[in-house]
Amino acid sequence: MLLQNNIFGYSRYVDDILIVYNNSNTDKHKFPDSFNNATPTMKFTIEKEINITINYTVQKATENFYFNIDRKPTITGTIIPSDSCHPHEHNYVAIHYMVNRMNTHHLNKSNKVFECNIIKNYIQ
C-alpha cells in the first residue's frame, strides 16, 4: 500500500500516523481511501499542514523535518512537588527523560533552546 501510493515516510505512535509523500507523485485524495479499504474497522482522517507545520509538532524545512515537543494545555509545570514524600530519584528520572527526549528528537535550534529552558524551570 505504501509503495502503490509512492509514500516514502511512514511513522506511527499509538493512534497517530505520520505519512510523508510528494504531492507530484501521490494523489492526496486517493491514498486515504486505500488505507480505509485495507482496514475497514478503522477510519483514517487527514490533518494537512498549515504554514509548513502539522499540529505544531512537525515543521517542514527545505530538505528536513524538524519536530517540537508537544504539551497539553493543562500542563502544570510541576513534576512531583518538592515537599512530597517521594524519593528525589523520581524527579531525577523525570528530568533525565526530558533531557534524553530533547537530545534524541530532531529539534531545530530554537526549539531545542526552548525545551532546555523548560527543563531548567523544572530544576529550579
Image (spheres, rainbow, N blue to C red):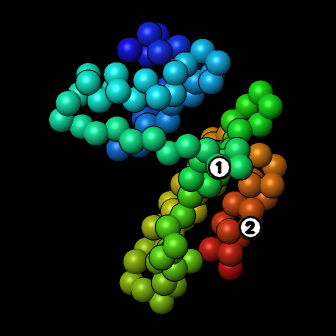
- The C terminus lies in quadrant: bottom right
Asked if the residues shown at circle 1 and circle 2 are in contact, with their CB atoms under 8 angstroms apart, the answer is: no
Position of 39 with respect to 28 (left or right) is left
Residue 93 appears at what percent x and percent y? 50, 60
Q: Which residue ends up furthest to the top in the rendered image?
A: 4
Give the distance between the C-alpha atoms of the residues marked 1 and 2, in whole angstroms: 26 Å
* Mark 1 surroundings: few (<14), some (14-19) or many (≥20) residues within 10 A: few
Position of 16 with respect to 23 (left or right) is left
Pick the residue in front: 9 or 71: 9
The circle drawn on residue 117 is 2
Helix, strand or loop at disc 1?
loop
Helix, strand or loop at disc 2?
helix
The vertical placement of 94 against 107, above or below, is below
- The N terminus lies in quadrant: top left
Q: Amino acid at mark 1?
A: Ile
Residue at 39% x, 42% y: name it.
45
Residue 47 appears at what percent x and percent y? 50, 45
Q: Which residue ends up furthest to the front in the rendered image?
A: 29
Residue 105 appears at what percent x and percent y? 63, 43
Q: Nearer the viewer, mark 1 or mark 2?
A: 1
Residue at 63% x, 22% y: name it.
22
Q: Is residue 57 visible?
A: no
Pick the residue in front: 112 or 49: 49
Residue at 39% x, 84% y: name it.
85
Residue at 81% x, 55% y: name it.
110
The vertical placement of 47 against 3, above or below, is below
* Mark 2 surroundings: few (<14), some (14-19) or many (≥20) residues within 10 A: few
Q: Is residue 122 visible?
A: yes
Mark 1 and mark 2 lie on one chain; the one further toward the N terminus is 1
The vertical placement of 10 against 110, above or below, is above
Q: Amino acid at mark 2?
A: Asn
The circle drawn on residue 50 is 1
